[in-house]
Image (spheres, rainbow, N blue to C red):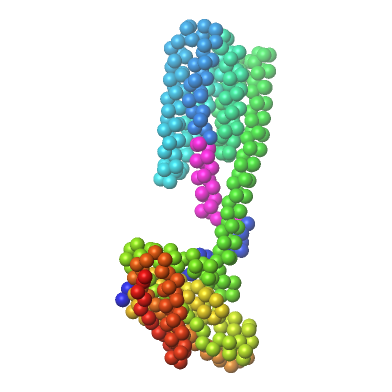
Amino acid sequence: MAHSTPTSPAAPPMPAPEEAGELTPEQQHDLRRRGLLELSRRTSAGVFMYAVAWMIVCQGGAFFQQHRRFALANAGGLLAVGILRFALHRRFAVLLERDMRRWVLAYYSLVFCHAVHWGSLLALSVTWGEAAAIRPFMVPMSVAIIMAGIIVVAIDPFLARCYPIAAIAPVVVLLMLNLNAANAVFAALGTAFMAYAWMISRVLRNDYWNGQRARALLENRARELEQVSLTDALTQVPNRLYLDRRLPVEWLQARRHKRPLAVALVDLDHFKRLNDTYGHPFGDRCLREAAATLRAQLLRPSDMVARYGGEEFVVLMPDTDLAGATAVAERLREQVAARSLLHEGQPVRIACSIGVAACMPSSPDGAQRLVKRADEALYQAKADGRNRVVALAHEGT
C-alpha cells in the first residue's frame, strides 16, 4: 500500500492581517540582498574609471614625463583595486548567500580604497606645487567622479554617508593643515560639497528604498489576492480553481515518475435535507466541520482537500494506490460520521459517501478522466445506501 505518514496539508497559508502593510524579516533580508546586488551592478561600470581618469589627468602639462613612476604607481594601485572590485562583482550574488556580513565588508573596503586613494590624489594636486600642471584637470575630473560615485552609492545608507567623507575629507584636511586665505575658501567649499552630497544621496536613497518597499508590499498584496482567489471563502480549504491547477501538475509528475495517483470524491449525505430542516446557516456549519475534519485527517503534506462545489469535496493523494486511497477514504468517512453538531441544543450527526479512483498515469491528459471515475464510484456509493466508500480502478489512459 503506497500511502503513509503525517503532516497536515492545506492551501498555502493566508497572510495574517497585521502582515498586510509590513514586510516580514525574510522579506526585509531579501530587500537588503537585492539592494546590495543592485549597488554592485551600478558601481561595476566605474571600477576601472579611476585608473583611466588618473592617466588622462596625468597628461596635463609635463607631469607624466616628470613624475612617471609616481603616476604609474598610483595608476597601478587604482587598477588593482578595480580588478578586485570587478572580480567581487562577478561572484557577489553567490558570496552573499554564503556570508553576507563578510563580503559586504569586503565590498565596502574596496570602495573606500578607491575613494580615499582618489581623494588623496586630489588633495596632493591642490596642495603640492609640482602638481600645479594637472590641477585644472584634476579638480573638475574629481568633481565629476565623486558626484557620479555619490549618486551611484546613494542607495546604500552606509556608503551614502561615508563615501563623500572618504573622497573629500583628505582634501579638506590637507588644506586646513596648510591654511591660508585661498585654502580656507577651498576647505569651506569642500565641506559644503560634502554637505550637499549628503543631501542629494539622502533624497536618492529614500526614493529608491520607498520604491522597493512599495514594490514588495504590492507583491504581498498580489500573493494575498491570489490566495484569496484560490481559497473557498466558507470552508477555508482550496477551491475548484486551485484543484484545476494542481491536478494536471500532479498527474504529469506521477506519469513522469511512474507512481500511482488517487482521487477521492466526498459528498455529504442528505445535505439538502439538512439545509431544509435546520436552515442554511447550519448547513454552512456542516460544510465547515466536514472540511476541517477531512483536512485534519490527511497526514501527508502532499495530500490535499479542495471544495469541488456545493457539498462535494475532492481529496487528491499523490503516490497512493487504490488500496491505500481506499483505506484513507474509509478513515475520512468514519471521522466525518463521528462528528456531531448541536442545533438548538440537539445533536445532529452528519455523514458522507466517498468514491475513490486510482491509476498509474500513462497519457499526458487523463487527469479529468480519473476524477470522472471517482465520480462514478461516488454515484455507486450513494446508490448502495450512502455513508460508505466505493473504490474503482482506472486504467490511466
Q: Nearer the viewer, residue 105 or 347?
A: 347
Q: Is residue 309 above or below residue 97?
A: below
Residue sitting nearer the eye, 17 or 380: 380
Occupied quadrant, residue 119:
top right
Q: Does the rendering let one see residue 180?
A: yes
Magenta-colored stretch includes residue 12: no
| Percent of width and height locating residue 135 | 58, 13
In the foreground, 141 or 132 = 141
* The one of 166 and 75 positioned closer to us in this rendering: 75
Q: Position of residue 100 (x, y in %)?
A: 45, 44
Quarter of the picture containing the C terminus is bottom left
What residue is rendered at 49% in x and 32% in y? Answer: 44
Q: Position of residue 28 (x, y in %)?
A: 54, 50
- Identify the residue at image location x=38%, y=82%: 391
Q: Is residue 114 left or right of 299 when viewed as pictured?
A: right
User: 215 left or right of 66?
Assistant: right
Query: Is 27 colored magenta in this rendering?
Result: yes
Which residue is located at x 48 percent, y 73 percent?
Answer: 305
Residue 328 seen from this side: no
Where residue 23 sits in the image (x, y, percent)?
Answer: 58, 54
The answer to whether 125 is drawn above or below residue 328 in the figure is above
The mark total stands at 0
Which residue is rendered at x = 62% and y = 50% of the image?
Answer: 214
Predominant SS along the magenta part: helix
Q: Is residue 237 above or below residue 289?
A: above
Q: Quadrant of residue 126?
A: top right
**Which of the image's four quarters has the N terminus?**
bottom left
Q: What residue span does the magenta drawing correspond to?
A: 22-41
